[in-house]
Image (spheres, grey):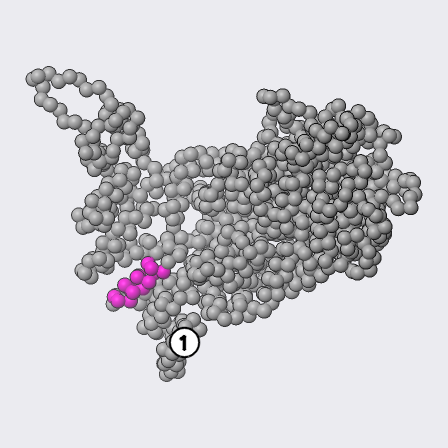
Amino acid sequence: MSHRPNRSSLARVCGCIGMCSLALLHAPLGTATATATAAQPTLRPTETALEVPDPQPAPDPAPSIKRLLAAPYLTEDEKSDIRLFHGIWTEADLSSPARTARAAFARSDFLDPSLDFPEVDPLIRIQALIGRGDFPAAQAALDRLPRQDIAPIIEFRLRAETLEARGQFAAAADMCDAGITALSLLKPASPADVVDGVRLLNQRIRLKGTDKDLPDNAPMRLRADPQAYHQMIDALGRVRDNLDAAPGAPSPKLYWPALAAEAEILYSRDAADKAQAAIAELLALNPTSTRAWAMLGRMSVDAFNFEATERIALRLDTIAGNPAPGAPIEEGDEEPKPVVNASIDGAIIRARAAIRQIDGARAAELLDVQLARYPSHPQLLAVRAAAEATRFEFESVKSRLAAFDALYPNSPVALYEVGRALAESRQYAESAAMLIAAHERLPAAPDILAELGLMYVQYGKIDLALGALEKSFALDPFNFRVDNSLRLVRELLTYEQIESEHFIVRYRAGEDAVFARDMLSGMEYNHKLVTGDGPGGVNHQPFEGKGKTVIDLMPDHEWFGVRIAGMPAIHTIAASTGPVIAMEAPRDGPKHQGKYDWLRVLRHEYTHTVNLDRTRNRIPHWFTEANAVSLELAPREYSTCQLLRDVHQADALFNLDEINIAFVRPKKAIDRSQGYAQGHWMYDYIIERWGNEAPLKLMDLYAQGVREEQAFQTELGMSRAQFLSEFKLWAREQLVAWGMLPGPGMPSVKDLVTELKVAANKPKPKADATDAPSPAPAEPDGDAPADEHAEPRLTPEVVQAWLEKYPMHPDILELAVVQAVKKAGDKATPELVPLIERYASARPVDPMPHRLLAQMNLATPDPQEQARAITHLEYLDAREQKTTAYATELANRYFARAGEGDVARAQAKAERATQIAPYEAPPRELAATIAIKAGDFATAERHISALVQLEPTRAIHKKRLEALKKMMTK
C-alpha cells in the first residue's frame, strides 16, 4: 500500500494551469505559492474568522471585462448588470429587489429574503428553491409559469432536473429530449440557450444512455449518440467563438457559463487537467463563481490536497458572506475573513476531505451545520450518509438511506455516495452492494457503472470489472480512466496464471513467465513470516480460507500505473489494494523503474494485505505502512537515520494526522520517506514499550471501528498527543545509540567550532620581553580568521585535539576518518583500521567504514585478509535493494571456501542475487552452478530453464539442461 490506490487518488490527476490563484492545488509546498509546511488546523464550525487561514485568492477580473465596463455607450444600469453577471458587483449595483436576488443566488445564499420578493425573476426563484433542496416547491413554481410557444431552454433544464431529483427518470429524459428539440427551433439560439441545451444533453446521457433518435437538425449537431462528448465540447466552444450576442445579452466571448459547463463535462470524464484550464479561464471572467470554486474543491480532495481544500472552502465561505464582492478595498486593508462553514459547497468539500481521511465523525459535524439550514438538500444528505459509512455505522447508514428515499424516491445519489466512500475505505463487499443498488435505479448512468467497475478492479474481481466497465464505456466512451481501466482489464484477462497454496500470480506470457515461477516459493516463505506469531508477525490468516491473494505482475511501469490508479504514471513500483497486489517487473530498461529486491517489496505489500484483512480495512495509513516496513526485516538505511535525525532536531516530526497525508499528498520532497521512516520508528517504540502484542491489539480495536485516539487511550493508556511527546524523548535516545547525536557530556561539533572562533578572535595579551613566545593557534596554511564571522578550518590537528578529549564522539570520528582516508589516497590502509573500526562502533548505522574496510580487504592478495571482507560485505548486502554486487561477491567467496555450511551460504547469496535481478543471466548461471554443487537439482533446473528463455540463442543453456535432466534420472 505504498500509495492509497482508490477511485480518485490518481484518477483525476490535476495538471498545473499557470494561474497563481489555482497553482496551490499542485505546487509543492516548498515553492513560492506554498504556505506553511505544517498542516492547516482542524476547523470547527464554531471557530471565529480570526482562527482560520486565508481563503484561496480570487483572480482579478479579466482586462476584457474592465474594457467593457469602460465603454462610454453603456448606461449605469447596463454596467450594473454586467458587474452582476461577472461576479464583481458593488452595493450600489443592488438597486432593486431583482438585482439583490440575483446577487444572493450567485453567492449560493438560497435563504436570502430577497429571493421571495414578487419582483424577482421566477426562474431565479425556482433555481433558489432547487438550491435549497425544496423540489416540490420548485415543481409547483414551474407548473405556474405561463405557457409559451417555445419556452426558454432553461425551463426545460429546470424541469428535467426537478423530475430527476424526484425519481421520475423517464419523464426527466423526455424533458431533456423536448428541450433539445426546442433548441433546434430557435434561430438564432442565444449562448444561454446553447449552454442549457448542452447540459440537457449531458443529463440525458446519464438518464438514458446514447442513441440516435433525436432530430438531425439540432444546432451544432447536438444529439445523444456516441460522439456526444465531442459535440458538447464543440458546441460550447462555438458559443464563445462564433455566435453573435443577442440584444442586451453578455458578449459570447465573455460568457463564462459555457466554461462552467465545459469544466463539468470534462471533470465528470476524468479530464481534470483540461477542466482546470477551463476553470482558470472562467474565474478570470467571474471570480465569485461558486460552481467553479466547488469543482476546484472537489479536485483538491481527489488529489489529497486538503490544505488547498480548506482554502477553497474558505473562498466559498467568503463569497457566501460577502454581499458586495466588487466593493473596492482600500490600500492596506485586508479582505474580511469569512465565518467558517458558511456555504453549502464549502461544507461538502470539507466533508469529502474528511471522508477521504476516513474521518466520518468530522464530516458529519461539518454537514450537520448546513443540514440545520437546508434539511432536504440532496447532496448534503447523501454525503452525510457517506460520513456514517466511513464511521462504519452501518445501521445508521441504513436509516439515513431510508430517510433519503422518503424525500427522493428511486434516486441513486445517496447510494452512489455511500458506495464511493466505502470503496475508498476498502469496504469492497459493502461498496459493491451500494453501487449495484444505485445502478439498478439508474441503469444508463455511466458514472455509477464506472465507479462499480473501478472498485472491482481494486477488489480483484476482474470478470465483474470487465462487465461494469464495458457497459460504462458503451454508454459514454469518453471517460479517460474508464478507457484506461477497460484496456487494463482486457489485458489482464489474456494473462496466464500459476498458483500455490496461498497465492495466484498473473503474468503476460513470455519472459515474465521466468520470474513468475520464482515468485510462488518466495511468497509462501513471506506468508509464513507475515501471518505467523514471530517478531512483527500479524498472527492472522487472510480471507479465512475463502480465497487467495492475487499478484498481478505488470510488464512495465505504465501498465503498473494503470493497474493501480487508472493512469500510466505513479510514484511507486508495487502496491496492495487488499486482496490484490500489483507490481512492476523488476528489471532495467526505458519502460521500467529498475531492478529491486522483489521478495522484500512483496513482503511489505503482503503485510498490507494481511493487516488490512485483520482490521477489516480500517487501519490508519501510517500504521499499516509502519507494520509493513517492520516486516521487511531489514536494517534501517543510513539515509533514513540521517533523515530521522534531521527532522527530530528540527522539531519537524509529523503528528498523527500529518503523517497520513504525507504518503498521499507530500508537501516536501522528503515527506513520503519521512512518513515511512517515522511510522516504522513509532511502531518500534510501541513494541519496545508495550510489547509485541500491543500493535495487534490496536489492530483489533481498529477492526471494530474504534478511532485512533480512543484506541490509543484504550490500549496504550494515553492520548495521541502524549504518545508523540513521549516518543520524541525515546527517539532522541535512539539517535544517540545510533551515533547520530553526540552522547551525554559531548558537545556538538557546531559548539566546538564556536569555541574555536571565540578563541581565535580573543585579544592576545602583550608579551613581556622576558616571556617566551607562545605558539599560535592551529590554522590551515597558517592563516588566521579574516574576521569574527569567518568559519575556522578544521585541520587534522584540530580534529585530533578534539578526538583526544572526546574519543568516541561520532561526528569527530567521522571527520577524522574522512581526513585520514583522503590523505591516504581515498582508501583505507592497515594503519587506519583502528580509527575506522572505532568510528564503526560509535556510529553503527553508517556503511562508510564497512565499504572502506571491504575494499581494503579485497584489494590484498592475502586470502586471510580477503576473508575479513565477508563481515563487511554481509553488512552492506543486508541494506542493499538495487544491486547484486554484494550478494554475488559473497556467493563467490563462500563457494570458494571449503568450510562447513559454506556451500549453503553461497547458495543463499546466489539466490538473493537472482531475487534482485531475476531477468539477468549471470546471477542465474551462478545460482545454477552452486545449486548443482549443493545437490539441489530442482533449483538448478529452475534457473537453467529460465536461462533457456532469457537467452534463447545460447545453445549452451539447452545442453546444460539436458545434462542436468540426465543427472536427475540417475
Q: Splitting the image into 4 quarters, where does residue 522 fall? A: bottom left
Residue sitting nearer the eye, 541 or 405: 405
Is the C terminus in the top left, top right, bottom left or bottom right quadrant?
Answer: bottom left
Residue placed at 71% from the left, 44% from the top? 240
Residue placed at 64% from the left, 55% from the top? 480
Residue sitting nearer the eye, 926 or 223: 223
Tell me residue 916's x, y (percent): 41, 61
Residue 834 visible in image:
no
Tell me residue 484's x, y (percent): 61, 58
Q: Is residue 324 depicted above or below 365 in this figure?
A: above
Tell me residue 467's x, y (percent): 68, 63
Residue sitting nearer the eye, 221 or 716: 221
Q: Which residue is mark 1?
A: 953
Judging from the image, what secondary structure is the residue with disc 1 in? loop
Does the magenta portion include 890? yes
Residue sitting nearer the eye, 257 or 409: 257
Does the magenta portion include 502? no
Residue placed at 69% from the left, 43% from the top? 259
Q: Which amino acid type is shown beneath numbered disc 1?
A: Thr
Q: Locate residue 900 relative to residue 155 in the image: left or right.
A: left
Q: Splitting the image into 4 quarters, where does residue 451 fall? A: bottom right
In the current view of this chain or complex, which residue is farthest to the left?
A: 770
- The dominant secondary structure in magenta is helix
Q: Sort mark 1 into few (<14), some (14-19) or many (20+) by Cα contacts within 10 Å.
A: few
Residue placed at 53% from the left, 39% from the top? 658
Where are the magenta residues, as a range? 884-897
